[in-house]
Image: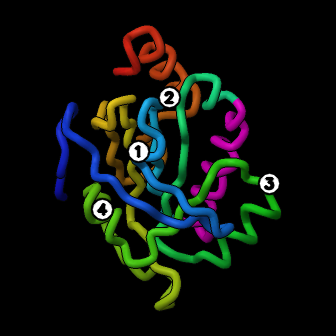
Amino acid sequence: MNFPFTNGDKAFDFQLTDCLGKEWRLSDHKGKLVCLYFARGEYCPTTRGEFAYFNAFARLFPKMNCEFAFVVNGGRTEHAKFARDLRIALPILIDDDGAIGEKYGIYGVNHNDLKRDDYKNYIAPGVYLIDVEGNVSAFWLASAPRGLPSPEAILGILGYAEHNGGKY
């Protein structure tokens, strides 16, 4: 497994389009904390639950000076339907070719669980917290979502960062 960052390293800037067609660029959020949740995809029952669970906290992230975004490795049409049907307020960014997942050291980029060329996936999820200056503040790379921080844990970290100059 490739760990391209240590805490304090400058995060790689990137631009992706979310599943509903809106452009999203990491550097546009400088001055805010950014939480990037690299997820398997809506086809995975566990990941569907994670999308819904984090979405329940969507209104709190901006109050903590935080932008939160999911990043998936394909399935634009399926994620758009999922986001509309479940009213997912958090952006679901589509990393079609896996280049962003590769740069961030996500395990199993461009895996093909669905046996489809138009819908690849990451094998295992990962979460990155980027500080207000655009540096990696914390990261979790896991073999299953249960090893990742909960929304409540992330909100606790954001509360700490709020009183520590936007750093954790």
Judge whether residue 45 is colored magenta.
yes
| Labels 3 and 4: the sequence-earlier one | 3
Q: Is residue 122 left or right of residue 59?
A: left
What is the three-letter code of the residue carrying label 3? Arg
Question: Which is more foreground, mark 4 or mark 2?
Answer: 2
Q: Which mark is residue 87?
A: 3
Count residues near mark 1 (Cα–Cα under 10 Å), then give few for <14, some for 14-19, many for 20+: many
State the SS at label 4.
loop
What is the three-letter code of the residue carrying label 2? Ile
Screen quadrant of the C terminus: top left
Distance CA(mark 3)–CA(mark 2): 22 Å
State the SS at label 3.
loop
The spot of residue 93 in percent (x, y) is 53, 61
Residue at numbered disc 2: 154
Distance CA(mark 3)–CA(mark 4): 28 Å
Distance CA(mark 1)–CA(mark 2): 10 Å
